[in-house]
């Protein structure tokens, strides 16, 4: 099973390229290899001091990579260039100008979003989830319920969600490439960069709320360098929680992509 490679400042490793692998060594171990073919995506702290040869090898191996930097959690996504393009790209571009198709995709995304929000609330609190479902609350009420369950303030919650959304979008990019969908061409988010990625992330964003609330339940001061700046320990814990949920998230992403393909093609 392929995994995500996380590299941040807390990683006390010496890493170098060794043929088709990365060689990882610490002060207490003799070292081990990570085959490049076993890396699904990479998440790298742009402030950390890593060998450029190692970074460029990851990029030129076609591994989708996200770089994050600073307390604002600014992220940059790299997307491999496919010389033969994407099978469904023309269908994606045509769908933007067809009202019937556009309406069907929009309905799919909104329905998926609602279902995911209800499921998330029920997982965190059965009572909150049932009330949200039965009373047909709107999106503002969902955000209020989630913030209450997280027992934190809006600023810290926003910082955590921003990082998690970066991880989510990177997995969506990889899934789009695997299914020959162009990550850049949106259907509802037509004029946005990574348009189809934002289409899909919009519909399953509540999955990140599930991880975020669990993160805040741990209540560790070491997760924050300041009131609104995640520490490396905080980033590492978010990565751990995300990895535990990743297979379920990938299944939801692939399911949504397949439904979009059925509509547009």
Image (spheres, rainbow, N blue to C red):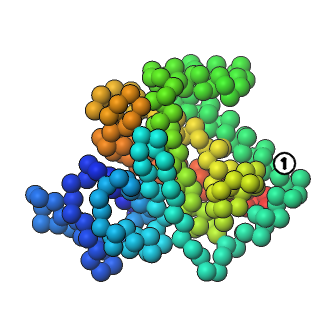
Percent position of residue 47, x then y:
35, 53
Query: From where the camera sits, is residue 237 visible?
Result: no
Name the residue at 29% across, 51% down.
9
Percent position of residue 161, x then y:
50, 38
**Alpha-carbon neighbours of circle 1 within 10 Å: few (<14), some, or many (≥20)?**
few
Question: Which one is in front, 83 or 49?
Answer: 49
Residue 70, compared with residue 93, is above or below; it is above
* Corner quadrant of residue 117: top right
Farthest residue toward the right? 99
Quarter of the figure that contains the N terminus: bottom left
Question: Which one is in front, 113 or 27?
Answer: 27
Residue 225, compared with residue 36, is above or below; it is above
Residue 59, compared with residue 226, is above or below; it is below
Residue at the disc numbered 1: 103
* Corner quadrant of residue 38: bottom left
In the rendered structure, the answer to whether residue 101 lies left or right of residue 175 reads right
* Corner quadrant of residue 174: bottom right
Percent position of residue 128, x then y:
57, 20
């Amino acid at each position: 099973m392929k995994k995500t490679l996380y590299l941040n400042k807390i990683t006390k490793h010496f890493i170098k390229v060794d043929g088709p692998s990365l060689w990882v060594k610490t002060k207490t171990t003799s070292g081990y290899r990570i085959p490049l073919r076993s890396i699904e995506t990479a998440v790298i702290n742009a402030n950390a001091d890593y060998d450029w040869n190692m970074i460029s090898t990851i990029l030129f191996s076609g591994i989708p990579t996200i770089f994050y930097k600073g307390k604002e959690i600014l992220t940059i996504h790299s997307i491999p260039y496919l010389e033969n393009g994407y099978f469904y790209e023309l269908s994606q571009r045509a769908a933007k100008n067809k009202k019937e198709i556009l309406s069907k995709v929009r309905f799919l995304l909104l329905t998926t979003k609602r279902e995911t929000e209800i499921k998330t609330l029920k997982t965190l609190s059965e009572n909150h989830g049932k009330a949200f479902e039965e009373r047909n609350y709107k999106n503002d009420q969902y955000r209020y319920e989630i913030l209450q369950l997280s027992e934190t303030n809006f600023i810290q919650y926003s910082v955590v969600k921003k990082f998690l959304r970066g991880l989510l979008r990177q997995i969506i990019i990889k899934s789009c490439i695997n299914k020959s969908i162009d990550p850049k061409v949106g259907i509802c988010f037509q004029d946005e960069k990574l348009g189809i990625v934002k289409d899909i992330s919009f519909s399953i964003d509540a999955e990140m709320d599930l991880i975020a609330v669990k993160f805040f339940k741990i209540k560790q001061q070491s997760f924050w360098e300041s009131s609104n700046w995640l520490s490396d320990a905080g980033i590492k814990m978010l990565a751990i929680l995300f990895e535990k949920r990743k297979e379920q998230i990938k299944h939801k992403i692939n399911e949504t992509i397949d439904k979009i393909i059925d509509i547009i093609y």
